[in-house]
Structure formats: C-alpha cells, structure tokens
Image (cartoon, coloured by chain):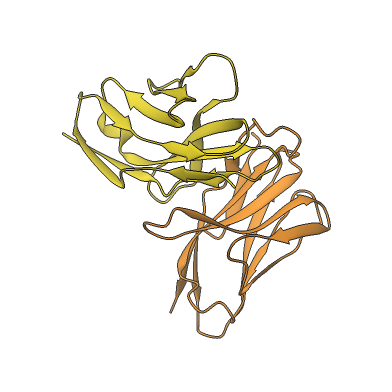
Amino acid sequence: DGGITQSPKYLFRKEGQNVTLSCEQNLNHDAMYWYRQDPGQGLRLIYYSQIVNDFQKGDIAEGYSVSREKKESFPLTVTSAQKNPTAFYLCASSAAQDRGYGYTFGSGTRLTVV
Amino acid sequence: AQSVTQLDSQVPVFEEAPVELRCNYSSSVSVYLFWYVQYPNQGLQLLLKYLSGSTLVESINGFEAEFNKSQTSFHLRKPSVHISDTAEYFCAVTGGYQKVTFGIGTKLQVIP
C-alpha cells in the first residue's frame, strides 16, 4: 500500500548533536512538508518542497535543514542551533497540482533532548 | 492571508451524546476546507473535506461538516459519539496559491 514512512519513531538527542529524521513516500507526490507539533500550538511548518532539488523555508526554519535529492525522500536535520528541539515531528506529502487532494501524513517521530 | 480558528481546545462529551467541534476561517479567496483526526502518538488522517458543491460533507465513520460561507465556518458534528472517537481534531484551510493552514486542534474526550 502507498504511504509515508517516518523513522525512527522515537529519537533521543544529546545537547550539541545534529540528528536526521527520515521521511520516505511511495505515493508519487511532488510536494513534501515537515511540521513540528507542540502541545497547544497545533502544527507549525518548518520546510516544504514542491519539486526535487528545491525547497522553501516555512514559519520556523531556524535550526533545521532539509534536502530533496529524490522525489521519494525528504529528510530533516535538526541541528545544534535549534535550542528547543524536543517535539513531535510530522512529515506530509500531497499532489501539488491538486490542492483539493489534502495531505497524507506519516506516523511521526518524537524527538527528545537528553 | 488566511487563518483558522478552533474555538475550543478541549471538548468533553459523554458516550452516545452529540458533539460539535467549531471551526471558523478567514480568507480573501475561495477556499478548500478539511478536517483531520489525530490519535495519540500518530500522524494526522484526513477525515473529510469540502471542495465545492453540496455544503454538507460526510465521513465514513458518521462525522459530518457543513460549509457556511456567510459565517465563514466549517463545524464538525457527530450525532452520537463512541469511545473510539477520542482524539484530537484539526481544521485546515487552503485558498488561492497559499499553503494549507491548520488550526491549533480540539481534543475530543469521550466519557464512558
């Protein structure tokens, strides 16, 4: 079945470390997104990409980086510059040419700083 | 610019009672509207959407939402809730060339 796979499900980061969250989709979707979810704050957009080798900053991009070398993959790196990285991270994809399609989400990665 | 307001952060309701989760939006262009559901420690799942046509849309598990253009609302309703409906519900809007904007979510707690 088609879908989005996020890994790992749980991730622990030490202070000063960079960590990379994986997001892979086999839906043939052009657009992919990374959101951060904190209690009571809903979903905040970190980065998005509408085509391979191109991506744009969202509302809270500081301290994060992404790449889009393949259509299927959109990894997110949480750098040491992100001062408060503990959160639930969600990856999503959509058919960019069909705005009424809606988003398909992965099951999320919970990142904790230890 | 567009925005979404979910007026209630938490809604407790007894099992088999009706429920309404409120959503209001603002946009200067025609919009598409969505409701997503999130179960604990999972991603969001699309519950239903309004694109055009009939203003009343339904999901396969008994939820419905009505698009009201004059009141800029898209409230979610269910006539009789079940324990399994306990989850967080997100309203979302997109219009023109803008990305999807999500509300902050409403936690539905169904009490046995």
Q: Quadrant of residue B80?
A: top left
Q: Is residue A1 left or right of residue A54?
A: left
Locate the C terminus of chain A and report the quarter of the image it occupies: bottom left
Tell me which residue sits at (31%, 33%) in the image.
Answer: B84
Residue B68, x across and y down, in percent:
45, 24
Tell me which residue sits at (56%, 44%) in the image.
Answer: B2
Colour for chain A in the figure: orange
Tell me which residue sits at (31%, 47%) in the image.
Answer: B9
- When the figure is inspected, residue A5 is found, relative to residue A85, above or below; the finding is above
Q: Is residue A35 left or right of residue A113?
A: right
- When the figure is inspected, residue A14 is found, relative to residue A45, above or below; the finding is below
- Front-lying residue, A74 or A101: A101
Residue A7, x across and y down, in percent:
58, 58
What number of labels is visible?
0
Residue found farthest to the top: B54
Q: Is residue A9 left or right of residue A54?
A: left
- When the figure is inspected, residue A12 is found, relative to residue B70, above or below; the finding is below
Locate the N terminus of chain A and report the quarter of the image it occupies: top right
Chain painted yellow: B
Residue B92, x across and y down, in percent:
51, 40
- Front-lying residue, A50 or B38: A50
Residue A37, x across and y down, in percent:
47, 57
Q: Quadrant of residue B73?
A: top left
Q: Is residue A21 left or right of residue A85?
A: right
Residue found farthest to the bottom: A16
